[in-house]
Image: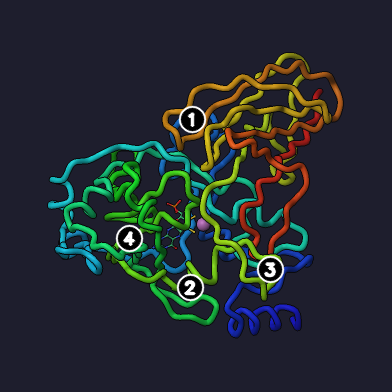
């Protein structure tokens, strides 16, 4: 009890999540985990994740938005402010972009000690086709003034985090905001956005961790000084400790995952499969550059997998590797490399908020 009380106190007073712990999962983490679900690993078989299987991360509550009165404001350091309803946005030119989104906190619960926040294991990821208006098109229509440095995106959802009352908001540097593939999406996999994914309109920033892709978009503000909101200034930093100014989290680090082969034990999720040939498969992605290799570890021996072409520069690619499974206990693993030369680590790179833990997945199997 004393421990939990201490966490609550520090969560309220300090501008950062609670102290990392080595204790058991807390009731607060369980509550976050049931609200924010991950993608079942078997969904890695599909190029596109059906919306119900795509991971969800919502800091506060899902707003109950009625599309009829809803409108988007584009304002700030622009020549011409805009106010657009959904029908007007749908008359603008549209693009469709396949994008792998991943939460920056994916892998957090594997860290020792464990930062207290959404306790992802490895499945805080999904890939969808997002359709909507290119952000650059709307910014060109509004005409960005010289002196603009960032664009701030504010969602309709409000809450309290780190003792700060806020609406969820994040900014992008101007050069990222003007990329042709950044989209104001009103469709996910060809249908209206589901409530949990940002209905009626969200931002999607290909290649960046999910926090940049603001859901339930209300306003777009072009600013001449860097944005200092909580989700920008305090959250989403690679920090060594609570007092470290840290480095902002931006692009998705290289990662690969495998579909665990065979069948699971209900409680332990440990895998059982028959001996003989089995096709191991999974997906790999990176926001920094193209995936160049995936290696599969079989009891510590690394073998290069076959890579397929991704649907787009920021969509995951499929990998496969045939394996002839011998009876006994085995440990499977996978690790990917991208065009910047970055490879997944085999041991954790710890940081205070539990960001970007792209440690290689391990899967224990019993072959019968
Ligand atoms: N308005 C708003 N946008 C948001 C969030 C939020 O809580 N509120 N969460 C962000 C985070 S941390 C992630 S990882 C992604 C998750 O997107 P998804 O739920 O569609 O998978 O949305 C981002 N956009
Ligand atoms: Mo996230």
Mark 3: secondary structure: loop
Q: Residue at x 83, y 30 (%)?
A: 300
Mark 4: secondary structure: loop
Report if residue 125 is visible in the image. Answer: yes
* Image coords of residue 6 (percent x, y): 71, 82
Label 4: few (<14), some or many (≥20) within 10 Å? Answer: many
Query: First in sequence: mark 2 or mark 3?
Result: 3
Mark 2 or mark 3, which is nearer to you?
A: 2
Query: First in sequence: mark 3 or mark 4?
Result: 3
Residue at disc 4, CB closer than 8 Å to ligand 1: yes
Query: First in sequence: mark 4 or mark 2?
Result: 4
Residue 26 marker: 3
Q: Which residue is mark 1?
A: 46
Q: Which residue is mark 2?
A: 230
Name the image colouring: rainbow
Query: First in sequence: mark 1 or mark 3?
Result: 3
In screen coordinates, is 252 left or right of 219?
Answer: right
Mark 1: secondary structure: loop
Q: Residue at x 57, y 31 (%)?
A: 291
84 lies above or below 254 = below
Q: Are marks 2 and 3 in contact (CB under 8 Å)?
A: no
Q: Residue at x 55, y 39 (%)?
A: 286
């Amino acid at each position: 009890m004393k421990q939990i009380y201490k966490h609550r106190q520090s969560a309220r007073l300090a501008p950062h999540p609670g102290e990392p712990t080595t204790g058991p999962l807390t009731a607060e983490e369980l509550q976050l985990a049931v609200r924010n679900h991950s993608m079942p690993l078997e969904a890695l078989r599909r190029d596109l994740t059906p919306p119900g299987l795509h991971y969800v991360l919502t800091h506060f509550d899902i707003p109950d938005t009625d599309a009829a009165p809803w409108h988007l404001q584009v304002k700030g350091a622009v020549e011409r402010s805009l106010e657009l309803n959904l029908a007007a946005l749908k008359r603008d030119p549209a693009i469709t972009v396949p994008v792998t989104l991943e939460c920056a906190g994916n892998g957090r619960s594997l860290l020792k000690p464990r930062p207290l926040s959404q306790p992802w294991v490895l499945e805080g990821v999904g890939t969808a086709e997002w359709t909507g208006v290119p952000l650059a098109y709307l910014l060109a229509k509004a005409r960005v003034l010289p002196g603009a440095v960032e664009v701030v995106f504010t969602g309709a959802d409000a809450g309290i985090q780190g003792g700060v009352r806020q609406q969820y908001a994040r900014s992008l540097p101007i050069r990222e905001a003007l990329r042709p593939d950044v989209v104001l999406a009103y469709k996910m996999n060809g249908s209206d956005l589901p409530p949990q994914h940002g209905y009626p309109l969200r931002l999607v920033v290909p290649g960046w961790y999910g926090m940049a892709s603001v859901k339930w978009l209300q306003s777009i503000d072009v600013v001449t000084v860097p944005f200092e909101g909580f989700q920008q200034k305090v959250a989403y930093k690679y920090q060594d400790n609570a007092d470290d100014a840290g480095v902002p989290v931006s692009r998705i680090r290289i990662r690969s995952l495998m579909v665990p082969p065979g069948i699971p034990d209900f409680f332990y999720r440990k895998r059982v499969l028959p001996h003989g040939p089995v096709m191991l498969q999974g997906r790999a992605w990176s926001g920094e550059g193209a995936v160049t290799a995936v290696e599969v570890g079989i009891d510590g021996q690394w073998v290069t997998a076959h890579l397929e072409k991704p649907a787009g520069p920021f969509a995951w690619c499929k990998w496969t590797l045939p394996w002839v499974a011998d009876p006994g206990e085995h440990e499977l693993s996978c690790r990917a490399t991208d065009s910047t030369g970055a490879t997944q680590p085999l041991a954790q790179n710890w940081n205070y908020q539990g960001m970007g833990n792209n440690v290689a997945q391990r899967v224990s199997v019993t072959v019968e």
